[in-house]
Amino acid sequence: MATIPPEAFYLTPGATGSLQQQIRAMVTQGILSGRFRPGARMPSSRGLAEHLGVSRITVTLAYADLVSSDYLMARGRSGYFVSENAPLAPEFPAGPPRAEAVDFRALTRGRFTRTPRVERPEDWDRYPWPFIYGQADPTLFDHQNWRQCALRALGKRDFAALTTDYYERDDPLLIQELLRTILPRRGIAAREDEVLLTVGAQNALFIAASVVLGPGRRAVVENPGYPAWRAIVAATGAEAVPVDVDSDGLPTQTLEGEVVFTTPSHQCPTNATMPVDRRVALLEAAEARGFVIIEDDYEFEMSFLKPVAPALKSLDRGGRVIYAGSFSKSVFPGLRLGYLVGPPGFIAEARALRGLMLKHPPGHIQRTMAYFLGLGHYDALVNRMKNAYRRRRQVMAEAIAVEGLAVAGQGGFGGSSFWMRAPDGVDTEVLALSLRADGVLIEPGRAFFAGDGPRNFYRLAYSSIAPQRIPEGIARIARALGRR
């Protein structure tokens, strides 16, 4: 049987994982792709180590790991060979390229792809000045304790939580942590039948809208406001009614519809925080006019300039507020774990709908988050983020003042971004493209407005940029605006 030459292996610069993990991946991919056949002899550990420029023990440990997984087998003094029992990918003859016989854009009327989006490059973290909203800063995250919680959730004692199909239920341990530690700090007292876990806040909003909206109904949306909410309303067949926000958020005088969507803690994107008296007026209007309120309470943890205001849900006595929360901004965006709080009748419908979509969020993620909360790591992380954001906000505010840029909204409670206004006549989508070539990323504001809104607004976030980089990035934005 042929010997696989060491030259069949190479380390990719910048690849993730340890050297041992990379060697294992190269071997398994070679076997699964059919390049390395059963019985083929592997390069000696010494020969492969010299070829790759790594230690021999690294190759030996990788080989031993592959033997335990039955990808390789060891034969006495003869070396390592591809196992006769190694997994093999099924082989199918390659077919001709498939034609797209159906015009799916015409079939769907493009009701999802035509939605305006805030464009962000996938490699945003490679730019020197990424003023991108919602991304995590790895220097702030508690990797060690999150890893320990994840490993604990993988343990034998938690095997059922990891592997069980909860059907339409949720991890009771995480539900208890929500009821005990998260909701009370928003002033919300809830029972188990009033809470539903979701795959992030986006999933929570889609479920909520699908339950309470439909053709012939109307939903009030903030303008400017969260772009995806207008698309979600449209997907239900309902009509989105934009209402202009002011310095205190959503006004209450002219709200007409079955559902009102609002972001009272940090209005998206202006960062305005709705005063308590307006929150009370909004609840009174809901009672008088019979509408339901969907409260997206994102970024409430990032109120570091003043004490956090009470959630609308905490003031709700008539059961008209559906509350959506998420761990994506306070832990990390890729977590995709959120929750809904509402009356039992609503939660029952939402749970049944979620069951049709995805049953429940992954059990391991739920249990890991429960441990992260229960052991106090979440509160320590939030406190660290608050301190870092306070410093970055101060640096950005000073740089903006020095460069003479115009702030359209910054909020008085904190958050993680500034809402900016460029001079009249400036198209910030064009500006963003020119700045990208200069290493600076900003978010154009057009997508936040309903219809043909103004084009001279943009958002600058400081969640994922080091404070020492902020002044130069702001200076580059100012220079770009000065050239226009």
Image: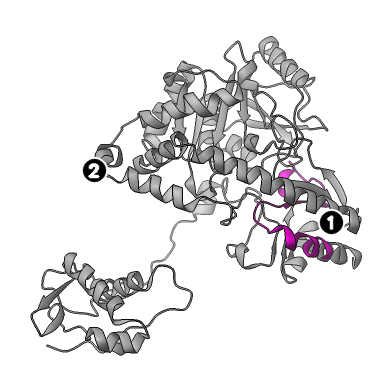
337 inside magenta stretch: no
Residue visible at 78% across and 21% down?
254
Where residue 340 sits in the image (x, y, percent)? 51, 28
Where residue 21 sits in the image (x, y, percent)? 34, 69
Residue visible at 73% across and 42% down?
269
Q: Which residue is mark 1?
A: 399
For mark 1, give the secondary structure: helix
Q: Which residues are magenta?
A: 447-475
Query: Quadrant of the image for the C terminus?
Result: bottom right
Question: Residue 250, which numbered label?
Answer: none
Precedes in sequence: disc 2 or disc 1? 2
On the image, which quarter does residue 273 sit in? Answer: top right
Q: Is residue 40 left or right of residue 321?
A: left
Query: What's under tag 2, amino acid-wise?
Result: Lys
35, 52: nearer the viewer: 52
Q: CA distance from mark 2 to mark 1?
A: 52 Å
Q: Which residue is mark 2?
A: 156
Residue visible at 64% across and 55% down?
464
For mark 2, give the secondary structure: helix
Q: Is residue 258 visible?
A: no
| 166 in relation to 425, above or below | above
| 327 in relation to 33, above or below | above
Q: Is residue 81 left or right of residue 120?
A: left
| 470 in relation to 344, above or below | below
- Taking the view exactly as shown, the residue that stands out farthest to the left is 76
Around disc 2, counting alpha carbons within 10 Å, would you say few (fewer than 14), some (14 to 19), or many (20 or more)?
A: few
Query: Quadrant of the image for the N terminus?
Result: bottom left
Residue visible at 59% across and 26% down?
185
Where residue 279 sits in the image (x, y, percent)? 72, 20
Where residue 239 sits in the image (x, y, percent)? 65, 31
Q: Is residue 242 left or right of residue 1?
A: right
Query: What's under tag 1, amino acid-wise?
Result: Ala
